Amino acid sequence: VSLLFGRGAFDARSVEITSVCLLGYAVGLYFLSGSKMLVPAAYAVGRPGLAVRAGVYAFLVNLVLNLALLKPLLMAGPLIGRPIVQGGPALATSIAGIFNFYYLRRRLAQAIPERFGGQEDRDVFRDTEGRTGKMVVAALVMSAALVGVRAGFGDISPAVIVGVGIPACVALYFAVLLALGVFRIDDIRRRFR
C-alpha cells in the first residue's frame, strides 16, 4: 500500500488504515469470488429465490458482525497501538461472504443432488477446499518471509521491494505450493507448450 499510495496527503496513518482494511477483505476474497459463480448457478437451475435469500442472509450477517465488532475493535486499537477499527467492516464483509458461499453451495447441492451434489462434485469441492487451505499456508509462509526480511533489514527502498522483494516472494509462494503438492512441474510444462 505504501509503495503504491504512500505519498502526499496519503501519509503513514492512511497507509496503516488502508492496510488493515485490505487484510480484512483478503480473508474472504476466495469466497466472495466463489459466490459470484454460485449466484448465477442458482438462477440457471431455476432457483432465483435461493440467490435472493442467500443475499439477504449475508446482508444480515454482515450487519450484525459490523455492530458486534465495532466496540471490541475500538477498545483493542489503543491497546495494541494500531488503528484496527477500520478493518471491522472489511472483516465483517469477508465473514458474510464466507457464509454466503457455504449457504449457496449447500442449498444448491440439496436442490440438484444429481448434478451438483454427486460424488464426483463432492470430490471436486473437497479437492478445491484442500488446495485452498494449501494456498493459505503458502500465503502465510510468503507473508512471514516478507515480514522477517523487513524486520531484519529495516526500511527497504521501494525499488528493491519491486525489483527483488516481490519476485522473491512470488517464487517462494510457488515453491511452497509445489512442495505441498498443489501442482507439479509437469503441469506447468504442459500449460506452456
Image: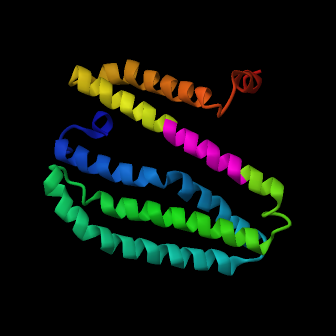
Residue 126 in the magenta stretch? The answer is: yes
Residue placed at 64% from the left, 74% from the top?
51
Rendered image quadrant of residue 189: top right
Q: Main secondary structure of the magenta part?
A: helix
Visible residue check, residue 156: no
Image side of residue 165 versus residue 128, left or right: left
Asked which colour scheme the image uses, the reply is: rainbow
Residue at the right extreme of this rendering: 114
Q: Position of residue 125 (x, y in %)?
A: 70, 53
Q: Is residue 45 magenta?
A: no
Please name the residue shown 74% across and 22% down the image: 186
Residue 86 image point, x, y percent: 27, 59
Residue 97 located left or right of residue 16: right
Image quarter of residue 147? top left
Residue plotted at (38% across, 27% down): 145
Residue 86 lies, with reference to residue 173, above or below; the image says: below
Query: Where are the magenta residues, as a range?
Result: 125-137
Q: Nearer the viewer, residue 124 or 166?
A: 124
| Left-right relation of 119 to 156 | right
Q: Residue at x 62, y 42 (%)?
A: 131
Which quadrant is home to the C terminus? top right
Across and down, in percent, residue 68 comes to 32, 73
Indicate the position of residue 113 as horizontal and vertical percent values: 81, 69
For the N terminus, which image quadrant? top left
Q: Is residue 73 above or below residue 23?
A: below
Q: Can residue 158 be seen in the rendering of this structure? A: yes
